[in-house]
Amino acid sequence: MKTARLAALAASVALVLAACGSDSSGSGATALDKLGTAEKQLNLVVWAGYAEDGSTDPAYDWVQPFEKETGCDVQAKTAATSDEMFSLMQTGQYDGVSASGDASVRLIDAGLVAPVNTALVPNYADLSTFLKDQPYNSSGGKNYGIPHGWGANYLMYNSKEVTTAPDSWGAVFDPASPFKGKVTAYDAPIYIADAALYLMSAKPELGIKDPYSLTQVQFDAAVALLKDQHGVIGEYWNDYTKSLSAFSQGTTVIGTTWQIIYNLAVAENPDLKTVLPKEGSTGWSDTWMISSKAANPNCMYLWMNYITSADAQAQVATYFGEAPANPKACDVIAASDATFCDTFKATDSAFAEAIHFWATPRTKCLDGSGDACVPFSEWIKAWTEIKG
Amino acid sequence: MSTSTHTVLPAPSHGAGRRLSRWLHTKPRARLVALIGAPAAWLLVMYIGSLVALFLNSVYRLKEDGSGIDKTFSLDNYHELFTTQVYRDVALRTIGIAVAVTVIDIVLALPIAFFIAKIASPRWRTILVAAVLVPLWASYLVKAFAWRAMVASPGGVLDTTFGFSPGYGVTALIVVLAYLWLPFMVVPVYAGLERLPNSLLEASSDLGATFAHTFRRVVLPVIVPSLVAGSVFTFSLTLGDYIAVSLVGGSTQMIGSIVYQNHASNLPLAAAYALVPVVVMVLYLLGIRRTGALEQL
Amino acid sequence: MNATRAVRWFFRSTSALVLAFMYAPLFVVIALSFNGSSALTWPPRDLTLKWWGKAIHNEGARDALMNSLKVAAGATVVALVLGSMASMAVHRFRFFGRDTVSLLIVLPIALPGIVTGIALNAAFTSAGIEFGLLTLIIAHATFCIVVMYNNTLARLRRLSPNLEEASADLGGDAFQTFRYVTFPLMRSALLAGGLLAFGLSFDEIVVTTFTASPGLETLPLWIFNNLSRGDQQPIVTVVASTVMLLSVIPVWLAQRLTGEPGAVTGGTR
C-alpha cells in the first residue's frame, strides 16, 4: 500500500523529468556561412591528450595559446571510448568532438553533428588528401568534419616468447595458440572488424569486401572466430596503459596495438616488435566534428582551424603519438625528431589507403553493397556475447 | 559528557523563533513534517525519481543504426536478457563472486575486529583502529592498480616474492575485491563487538565454557547484524564493480562491466540489466530488515 | 577477558597477517612512486625522486584536490542537515511510513554505485540540468545521508529524554533546547558521521564518473584519467602516496576530537 503510493509519486516525478527532456532527432542542421564574433567559451569532448593545457605536463600546452588568441575558454571532457563520446554528444552540452570512425557515422546519422563549411577552416587545404571525403567523415556529399590524425592497428609480439615472427593476424585468431592466456585484443565492438578483415583473406569464400559492411553470414563467421579466440585471450584492453603494462611486464605476449603503445613499451621491454600483417590492418582516423546544437559554433570553427595548423598538429602528434593530418607538421617536428613522421608513415598515402579505417556499420551498407548489412547495434550486443 | 552541562541557559528569547517554537509545540504533525519533509523529498525526487527515469529507458529500444533511442514501448531488452545465455551466466558469476568475497571478508574481519575490540590494550586499540581506517582513505583506484602490479604473472610482486601468483582472472579478482571491501566489513564488526559487554564473555568463561564455545554461542549471535551490515557493502560494491574487474579480472565480465559498456552504447539494455543488481539488493535488504542490520551501515 | 594464552596468540598473529594484507599494496604504491620506469611494472628499478619533483608542479592534481575538497564539504553539509533531520523525525515520532524511511535512506548506498550513477545521469540529462560541482554535490550527498542518519539516530537513542524535558521545564523553547542541549550532546556523533561522509565522498569514483561536467576533475577522476596515460602513471603513485599519508590527519583528528576510538567507526551507538 505505502510502497505503491511511493512508487506512484516517484513515477510522476520521473514523467515530469522525462517530459522536460528534449528529443535529440532531427538532422536538418546546416553548415555555418561565415564566422561571427567568437563566443567566450568552448566545450569539447576529446580523446585524452588531444586538448592539453599544460596541467598534465607544463611542456605540452596548446590550449592556452588558443584561449589567448581567440578569447574562447576551453573546457575539455576526455572520453575513454567511442561509445562514451557518442553518449556525451547526445547531451547537447558540447560544441565539438574528436570522433573516431566508430562514432562519427553514428553522430552524423543521429543528426548530432552539423556539416562543416571547410572554406571557414583555411588550414583544411593543407591536410592529407587521403583523409578527406571518407565514409567516416562525410555523408551524402557533405563534409562533416576536419581530419585530425590517424594510426594503424599493428600486431605486437614479444620476440622472446613468440620466436617465429608472425606475418598474419592468424597468430591471434588461433584457438590452439601456444600463447593461450597471453593473447590480447582491443576491447570494443569495432574489434569485430579485425576478425572480418582476417576472414577476408583466410576465408575468401565468405566474400567479405569491407570489414564494416558485413552480411549476416559474414558477421556470424567473424563472431564465431572471436568466440573461439576468447579461449586464448589473457585480457582485453581498452585504455592504452593497460596494454602497455601487460606487454612491458610480459603478461601479454601477442596482440593488437597502436604505434604509441609500442614506442612506450619497447623502452621498457626491448624484446617487443611490431608488424603490419599481410592481410593489412584496421585503423583509426579521428575527425573534429561540430555539434548540431553547438552553443559556441564560432569558437569551434576557430578551434578546428587552430588544431589543424602545422604547429598545433606537431604538438598533438608528438604528445599523443599519431600521424598528423597536416603534413606540414612534419617539418616542425623534424626540428626535434627527424624520424617521427617516417615512423608513423604520416605522408605515406599508399600505406594509409591500405588501412581499413574504423567506420560505424549500419543496415545501409557503408560500401554501397546493399541494405542488408548488420547494423552497429548488433555489433554491440555480439561483443558482450563474445566476451562471455 | 560535554561542556553543555556547565552552560547556563540564557533567558528565553522573544520574537519569531519563540512564537514558531510555541506553535510547533502544539502541532506535532507540523513538527514531523518540518523534520522529515526535506530529507524525504530529497530522496524521493533525487533518488527514486532518478531510478524511475533510468528504468523508463529499459522499455525503450536502441535504434538499429545505434544512432539514438527509439522511445516507443517495447519489451525487447527484457526478451534479449532472458533469452541470451551470456546475461544469465554473467549475473550468476557476479553473484557467486559476491558471495565468495563476502565470506572471505567475514573470515578476515572477525579475528582482527575481535582482537582490537576485546584483546588489545586501550593504547593499541587506538592505534589499530586508525590502522584499519587509513586504507579506507587511500584511493580505491590506486589500490586496484597496485594489485594489477601485484598479481601480474610472470614478474608481479607475488610472483617474484613467493614464486606464485594466480595471474589475471577470477581468482585474482575475488582476492582483490575482498581486499578492497575489507574495511567496510571490519568497521561494523568492530563496532558490534565494542557494544558487546565484556562481562558477558567473562560470565560465559566463568561458567566453564571454552573460548571456542563462548565465541560461537555468545559472540557470534550478537554480531550477526554487524556481519549482515558489512555484507550489504561487500555485496553491493561487488555487484556494481567494473573497474577492478577490468584491471585484474583478465577476460572476465561482471554485471558492472556489461552495464558500463552498454551505458554509452545501448542505454535501454544497460538500464534493463541494471535491474538485476537492484532486484538482488532490494530482496536482500527486505530479507535482513528484521535483523536491525540497516542501522549499522 | 580471560582468554587463554593460545587464544590471544592466535588473534594477535591473525590480526598481524590481516594488517599485512591490508598494507602490502599500499607499500607497493609507495615503492612504485620511486620507480625509474614509467610503466607500473614490478620490480621498481633505477630508483628516482623525479616523479615527486614533477608532481609538486602538477596543476591538474592540485585543482582536482580542491574540487574534491569542495564536493566532499558540500555533500557532507547537505547530508548532515538532511540525515540528522530524518533521524530526529524517526526517533521522536511514530508515523505512517516510518519503516520505509530507513529503507529509503539506506537505498542509495545499498544499490551499486553504477546504478546510482547512471540513474542520476539519466535524470539530470532528461531534466536538462547542467553537470557541474552542483550535480556532484547532489549525487554525493544522496549516498552520504545514510551515514549521518545512522550515526545521529544511534546517539539520539542513547540520550536521555529527561534532559530535553528539563530544558523545556526551565523555559527553553524548541530551538534553544536543540542549540544548548541536544546539539552539544550530539556533537561527537555528528563529527564522526561527518568525517565518514567526507571520506566516502572524497574517494568516490563511480557515481562521480557519471555526474561530473566537462573539464571538472575530482581527485579520483584525475587519478583515473591519468592512470590511462602512460607517462603520467608514476605521478599518480606520488599523489596517491601523499593522500595516503595525509589521511592519517583526519583519522587522528577524529579520535582526538571524539575522545574515544569507537566514535570514528560509529562504535558509540
Image (tube, coloured by chain):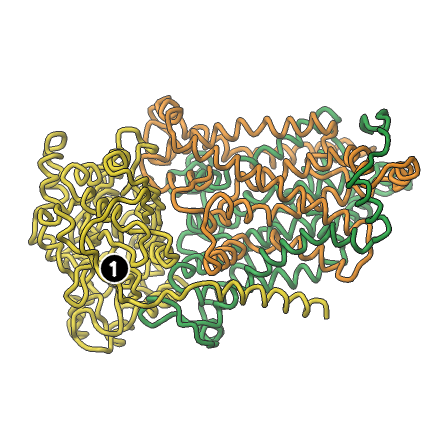
Residue displayed at 31% across by 70% down: B65
**Quick check: can you spot residue B203?**
no
Residue C211 position within the rendered picture, expressed as x and y whole percent measured from the top left: 47, 50
Residue type, numbered disc 1: Ala
Q: How many marks?
A: 1
Question: What hue represents chain A?
Answer: yellow
The residue positioned 82% from the left and 40% from the top of the image is B18
- Callout 1: 10 Å neighbours few (<14), some, many (20+)? many
Q: Is residue C50 visible?
A: yes
User: Where A388 falls versus A54 (above or below)?
Assistant: below
Please state which of residues B84 and A288 is positioned toward the viewer in this rendering: A288
- Residue at image coords 37%, 65%: A24
Q: Residue C30, position in %: x, y? A: 46, 28
Disc 1 target residue: A114
Residue nearest the viewer, comparing B234 with C182: C182
Q: Residue at x 37, y 28 (%)?
A: C58
Q: What color does chain B have in the rendering?
A: green
